[in-house]
């Protein structure tokens, strides 16, 4: 808790590059009203859900409506060595969208067409501005669905760029496993395709997965082909309170180690339950709880549910006294999931005017209890208010420390807690980021995690593919 | 069938680089008896299971026993700009191991320790020379297994380098999905780690997946951490004959589209069944057949089996007359799988002295029947003997055209059939290689598949990470 904090954790380095008049003119000519330098538009594109608030907005915004728009923007920007920051819907959490070197925000939100649904192949191709809810609405009639749910109604482009995951990843994987192919515009404005619609391939370097998680620093994604899954014949959800966080986590660990194909298993600590009770009047027992969901055949779902109840009983849950509340209809399931989906807003409202500093560590499942419990004790010792939710089936969890942005000492306490948590997770062979990405906020952590040699390799790749450093510069690592 | 064949399909370009005496001396001093220039040793390291036979062997072989050995070899080779070709067990199929630019074969077969089994996390870390059978033997007592089975008892290093998959991929994925982390030695001899043991991560570029499938051209793999899975409670295997290849393929397509979590579904055409009957005296009906395997709970396995029988009945199989032969004990299952495992050897023995030219296309599942049937008709029209097996659940299948190596016209017929098949697969949004890799044999196909822009990006990455082009040069693409 007493290690020195790097300044990068508190405020990013700002090195704004000039945006020459000639480029402004060229963009205005090319894009007309779809090019803007209005302050309100720029400010809207100069922030995300991170805690960084003091970065000047981008110099201009381009609203792209086609791959050609993206290619032309990059060709011009490359010519003038001006940064381009791809923008979807603005829901990223680590400062990805902040114009720390100035330049152009390239808004792809209007590129929101579902291009082709291949139900027979369980694939769909979309433009990057399509959101996950929009996608699921579009494929609904096929009996298929797209499982990745990071909470926010993020765009597929943004989810690809941050290697997002969320509540269903324990069964269906993350964007890493679910993106089949991409169309990408390179730094010089060239359009390439990575991957095909074949389910697997050994044809050359895996450019698809190099782009997935590259946070806009290697190319701008203009099409995404992802896998779909048949809607399960039966879905059953349950909520179960536990005598302690440890009991909830140990139950989760056993579920995973036994290979039970649970679709979702989410932890809420007692703080969070209190907050959502206040916010949504749910009347839940103010104890740690697990929200679980089972997908499969009716018998399969029942089998899984029985196994999980046995494991919970072994961990001190009085399963014979109705500790599990079950939901099988979509309406009942939605009600149960309200607690999870409203957790962030409930927490924010519990301390008016606050911001949440969110952690994102992920550890091997056997270390989850140790990592989590030590971090809870440490946070409790500071007295800072927080909520704690977790995709615990993957070993991934988030503390949200609630800080008053006007009190630097609260910010510092939160950052120190985060630092201690990351250090602990790394010592357990885990990662500083399970699903949010590095952005501005975790650059120092990446070096601790990956080592200087691996980061140097990333930097070499970046420099080779973007020699003028125009693609979302200043993120992931310094050059 | 009449497109001109590129010379690269018939014989690779050979551009042997000098191996200076000073380097020979340095390697001899460093490695002593673990360094060899004996012709027999070099010849053994200068070939693989591909059809290329006329390439001179490497100038020397180093037998590495540690990461430090690998690092020292690369440091020296880099200093003298001499190629290094990593060698596991020699089972690759596309010319990966051939010393087309001379240099050193770096044999990592002795690096065959299982370093740590983390049963509680369902992970294991091994050295690259560990074979998949050795790995499964090592983890047997934990109740876990490693599912990827490419047929050959390949090394984990080689399987990683070629992004291998095989019979279980339809359920458990390929090396792409199952490698968590790597230790890699770079071209300059630096040791880096990619990834952690966390199940998911958004921490920076996905160097792990950049290395998976890079065929030894970006680094030498010295440690591999992969996922393990709990042994299923119940396993049931079945063999079923079909009135036609089309009926077998349409059954497979329905299984996949319905989301039945089948673990294996392998096609053998009637030719192949005839060959294995002769070779192993199996007495199977000489019709196309599917070999299937179901993993799960006893009820789950039964449910899957019933669904599959219904689908087969819809496709003309007389399921009420014992068309399915079932096996539930390990011994019975092994007997059923004999047909699949011996297919290659049975085929080779059916035409004494022949070599097999193997195809490896993979298409979206809805196109599988069209792709396969047209290619069968085309092969039949030439009269060339062949066997046809397929991981059809993934849309991946292999023709093995049996050619007399002394008859260039047979080789050319086989290459023309392969060319037509790849062209067809690419027109269906498929890939030229589902699991074997590009090596020497498919370099032209990669350009057709990925496009010049994507291949240029691969080349840029290669040049940035290996500026002297010493890592398995001349493979995947030309520089």
Image: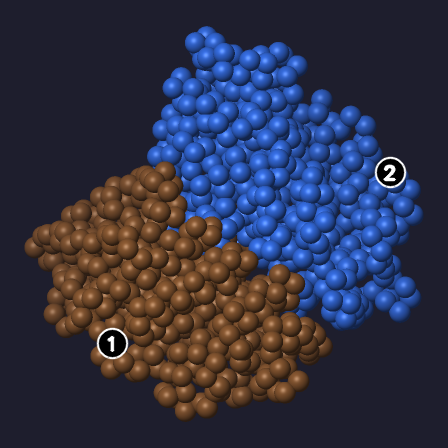
Chain colours: A brown, B blue
Q: Residue furthest front?
A: A381
Which residue is at a point 34% across and 73% down the rendered structure image?
A: A386
**Horizontal and vertical percent for residue A407?**
18, 70
Contact check, label 1 and label 2, Cβ < 8 Å: no
**Horizontal and vertical percent for residue B353?**
78, 25
Which image quadrant for residue A95?
A: bottom left
Which quadrant of the rendered structure holds the C terminus of chain A?
top left
Q: Secondary structure at mark 1?
A: loop
Q: Could you classify mark 2 by the number of other residues whose Cα lies within 10 Å: few (under 14), some (14-19), or many (20 or more)?
A: some
Q: Residue furthest left?
A: A21
Which residue is at a point 36% across and 87% down the rendered structure image?
A: A279
Residue A200 shows which numbered tag? none
- Vertical order, B143 against A317 (above or below): above
Which residue is at a point 41% across and 40% down the rendered structure image?
A: B458
Can residue B343 be seen here? The reply is yes
Q: CA distance from mark 1 to mark 2?
A: 75 Å
According to the picture, the residue beneath numbered tag 1 turns out to be: A354
Left or right? Give the position of B4 relative to B205. Answer: right
Left or right? Give the position of B144 relative to A355. Answer: right
**Horizontal and vertical percent for residue B105?**
55, 22
According to the picture, the residue beneath numbered tag 2 turns out to be: B279
**Horizontal and vertical percent for residue B332?**
86, 52
In the image, A135 versus B403, the foreground residue is A135
Chain of the residue where label 2 is placed in the rendered structure:
B
Chain of the residue where label 1 is placed in the rendered structure:
A
Left or right? Give the position of A367 relative to B384. Answer: left
- Vertical order, A162 against B421 (above or below): below
């Amino acid at each position: 808790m007493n290690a020195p904090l790097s300044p990068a954790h508190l405020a990013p380095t700002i090195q704004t590059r000039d945006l020459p008049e000639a480029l402004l003119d060229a963009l205005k000519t090319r894009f007309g009203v779809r090019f803007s330098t209005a302050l309100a538009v720029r400010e809207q594109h100069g922030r995300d859900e991170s805690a960084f608030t003091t970065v000047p907005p981008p110099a201009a915004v381009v609203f792209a409506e086609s791959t050609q728009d993206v290619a032309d923007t990059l060709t011009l920007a490359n010519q003038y060595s001006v940064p381009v920051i791809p923008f979807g819907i603005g829901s990223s959490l680590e400062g990805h969208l902040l114009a720390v070197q100035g330049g152009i925000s390239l808004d792809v939100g209007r590129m929101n067409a579902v291009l082709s649904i291949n139900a027979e192949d369980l694939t769909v191709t979309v433009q990057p501005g399509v959101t996950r809810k929009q996608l699921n609405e579009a494929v609904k009639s096929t009996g298929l669905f797209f499982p990745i749910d990071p909470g926010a109604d993020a765009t597929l482009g943004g989810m690809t760029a941050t290697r997002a995951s969320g509540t269903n990843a324990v069964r269906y994987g993350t964007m890493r496993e679910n993106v089949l192919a991409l169309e990408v515009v390179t730094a010089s404005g060239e359009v390439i395709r990575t991957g095909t619609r074949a389910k697997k391939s050994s044809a050359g370097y895996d450019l698809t997965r190099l782009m997935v998680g590259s946070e806009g620093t290697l190319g701008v994604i203009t099409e995404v082909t992802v896998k779909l899954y048949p809607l399960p014949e039966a879905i059953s959800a349950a909520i179960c309170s536990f005598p302690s966080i440890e009991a909830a986590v140990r139950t989760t660990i056993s579920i995973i180690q036994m290979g039970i194909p649970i679709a979702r298993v989410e932890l809420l600590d007692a703080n969070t339950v209190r907050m959502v009770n206040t916010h949504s009047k749910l009347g839940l027992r103010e104890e740690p709880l697990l929200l679980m969901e089972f997908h499969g055949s009716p018998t399969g779902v029942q089998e899984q549910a029985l196994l999980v109840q046995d494991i919970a009983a072994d961990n001190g849950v009085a399963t014979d006294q109705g500790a599990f509340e079950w939901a099988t209809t979509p309406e009942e399931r939605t009600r149960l999931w309200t607690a999870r989906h409203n957790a962030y807003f409930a927490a924010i409202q519990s301390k008016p005017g606050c911001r949440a500093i969110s952690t994102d560590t992920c550890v091997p499942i056997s270390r989850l209890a140790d990592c989590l419990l030590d971090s809870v004790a440490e946070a409790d010792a500071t007295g800072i208010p927080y909520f704690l939710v977790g995709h615990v089936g993957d070993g991934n969890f988030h503390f949200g420390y609630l800080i008053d942005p006007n009190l630097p000492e609260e910010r510092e306490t939160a950052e120190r807690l985060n630092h201690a948590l990351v250090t602990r997770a790394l010592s357990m062979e885990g990662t500083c980021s399970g699903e949010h990405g590095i952005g501005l906020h975790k650059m120092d952590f990446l070096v601790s995690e990956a080592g200087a040699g691996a980061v140097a390799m990333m930097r070499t790749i970046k420099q080779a593919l973007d020699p003028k450093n125009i693609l979302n510069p200043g993120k992931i690592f310094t050059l």
